[in-house]
Every structure is written in structure tokens, then in C-alpha cells.
Amino acid sequence: MRKRLSPGSWPEVSLTDARERRDDVRKMIRAGDDPLHSRKMEKIRARLSADASFQSVAEDLIAVRFVASQKAEVTIEKAR
């Protein structure tokens, strides 16, 4: 099965940049690395570091729903 990797679309990526990226990918393949796997792992790392953990989302919810509406401190602590 053949894998395809796109350097990007034309107006954003010049022909020179596309050729450089192609050469970099070929070097990675010769070194035994999988460029598609590397790209997927980068995307996963970016999503994880986007601070979208359950804890951060819950803290935002508490800040918006309880603290901003000036609920009692006991209520805020229960929510935490």
C-alpha cells in the first residue's frame, strides 16, 4: 500500500519549499522513520497540549457558572 504525504497547497507553499520538504521526507524514509506517523504524533501532541483536559474544562465551567454568578463559597467548593 502506498502512502501519500502532501507538503501543502500551492499558494501557501512555493515550489522551492515543496521540493525541500520532499527532500526532507526522503531523508527521513532513508533513516527508517515514517513521516506520516511522525505527523500524526505531532497532531496528537498539539491536541493534548491545547489544555483541553477534563480538569481545565471543569475549572473553566466553575469559573463561569459559579464564580461569575457570585454563588456561595461552599457551593463553589462542592463543585470543585
Image: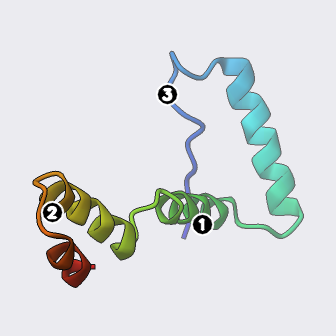
- The secondary element bearing badge 2 is classed as helix
Using the image, determine if residue 23 lies above or below residue 58.
Answer: above
Q: In the image, what residue type sits under mark 3?
A: Ser
Residue at image position (73%, 37%) is 21
| Quarter of the rendering containing residue 76 | bottom left
In this figure, which residue is indicated by the disc labeled 2? 66
Amino acid tagged 1: Met
- Residue 27's place in the image compared with 73, above or below, is above
- Residue at the image position 15 percent from the left and 63 percent from the top: 66
Task: Give the class, few, some or many, for how many residues have Cα within 10 Å of label 1's Cα (few <14, many ≥20).
Answer: few
Spatial CA distance of label 3 from label 1 is 22 Å
Nearer-the-camera pick, 15 or 65: 65
Residue identified by numbered label 3 = 9
| Badge 2 or badge 3: first in the primary sequence | 3
Q: Can you identify the residue that label 1 sits on? A: 41
Taking the spot 57% from the left edge, 64% from the top edge, the residue there is 45
